[in-house]
Image (cartoon, rainbow, N blue to C red):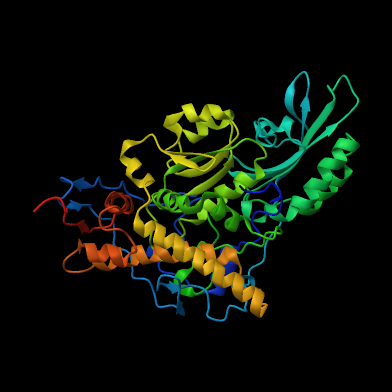
Amino acid sequence: MVEQSDRAPLLNWEEIQPTELTQAVPAPAKENGSESNPPDGRSLGSTALAIGRSTSSWGPASVTTVPRVNRIPHLDHSGPWGVPSPIHADSRISLKERMGWEEKDQIVAVFVVTFDTRSGNMVEWCLPQDVNLDGVEFKSMASGSHRIANDFIYFRKGCYFGLACFANMPVESELERGARMKSVGILSPSYTLLYRYMHFLENQVRHQLQCPGSYSPLEAFYEDKKAVLPPAGNGLVIACPTSAWVPAINRCMHPEMKITHPAGCMSQFIHFFGEQIMVLWKFSLLRKRILIFSPPPVGVVCYRVYCCCSLANISIPGIGVAVPKFRPFFYINVADIAALATEMSYVACTTEKIFEEKKELYDVYVDNQNVKTHRVSLQPLLRLNGVDREKYRKLSEQRQMLLYTQEVDGDCTSNEEDLFILFFMEQNNRIFQTLSEVAASADPTLTAEHMRAMGLDPQADRTFLVDLLELYGIDAMLVIDNPCCP
């Protein structure tokens, strides 16, 4: 079980501004999709995906294509599955040093939420005073929080992301019914920089509990960190960072995380789900709507939301341009039902059990370590096969080797977060590199040998691959002999 001591920054990595990226690397080709995303995070020029055509269980399946993707470029060295890795061979150089980017302060609002025994959750103070914070009083104080002493919550508010720290202090007051509960939070156009303010928010919520109405530190903080937004005032919801390892993979989604807990959030994510991580990996790659339920505290569950998004990372230019963006919603509640109804792909978490009954809002429901789906077409993906277990075994072996190297050689330049993220990114790269090569060949037919080369089971992963071909619009035909038929 994941310990509650995961109270640490979620994302310790920084995003490069588009102008800085242009200076850092040559301009990529337009088909790579690096300049095709409007402020809402969706791709421009996307066409409707063709509906896949399948025959009987032993017959072929074909999918109409969108423009074919480019082959993955040659990179420095092979990763866990023999797939070129975007990490330079000299791992002693940190990702931050190689990327050379600088994070900008972009705080658009700071606020204090309190629980009033007569009115419920309410915003008691904020800057700027005219900012729209409708609903933030419920996002920053999760349902059921009255049963815990403290927590932290990541959430989305329109085009912004937020982080709030909650605390519950016993008081000798009949008016407050023996408890004072508050949250202090911030909003930003991107979730990538929120981690750096965790400690400040924790201190401030304790200060607000002890000295209600003392807002001077928050006022000074806002004046120092407030964002200078475009004239339209629209923030950019960022699905993933834009990195600059090498010019050929300018849209790689690999953050550098430094979690203060000895075991990082990705490591604990893997430990918590065990082999079920392979099931979540497939649903993530298929851009399904994934909802994670857990009672408070919700901070560690927000980590799981982020980790789920990391399972779908692909560093091959052009792949995924026309598919829904796989974005983290982090914590949600009943006030988010209308917004979720319009989302085609997301990962979110909640403390409200009522969401389990709202089956139209999600494809996959995760309750503790139990991963389930009400969609009949997705149920075959819940079953682990031998290849899945072998991949998980290799992942576990690599982790043990990393820990051994760190202990024996004192090598701390590599970490578990990099290992886990790269493992799945390289697996994803291997799949799409093979698919793009087959689609570009004279005979775009996928065989059992191709599936084994992708690290998939020729029979058990058939449904997964057919869905993948249809979603990503890859022009290839799957023909695999059914062992039950002559």
Residue 274 locus on image (x, y percent): 50, 53
Toward the viewer: 384 or 309?
384
Image label count: 0
Q: Is residue 214 above or below residue 8?
A: above
Residue at the (84%, 41%) spot, across then down? 206
Q: Is residue 142 above or below residue 416?
A: above
Judge whether residue 183 can be spotted in this image. yes
Residue at the (40%, 65%) spot, across then down? 429
Q: Is residue 469 above or below residue 109?
A: below
Toward the viewer: 394 or 107?
394
Relative to 418, 31 lies left or right = left
Q: Quadrant of residue 147?
A: top right
Residue 379 locus on image (x, y percent): 35, 41
Residue at the (38%, 60%) spot, across then down? 319
Toward the viewer: 124 or 140?
140
Judge whether residue 243 can be spotted in this image. no
Spot the residue most to the left: 486
Quadrant (top left/top right/bottom left/bottom right) for the C terminus: bottom left
Residue 235 locus on image (x, y percent): 60, 48
Relative to 445, 198 lies left or right = right
Toward the viewer: 231 or 406?
406
Q: Quadrant of residue 19?
A: bottom right
Residue at the (50%, 75%) spot, across then down? 246
Residue 321 locus on image (x, y percent): 39, 56
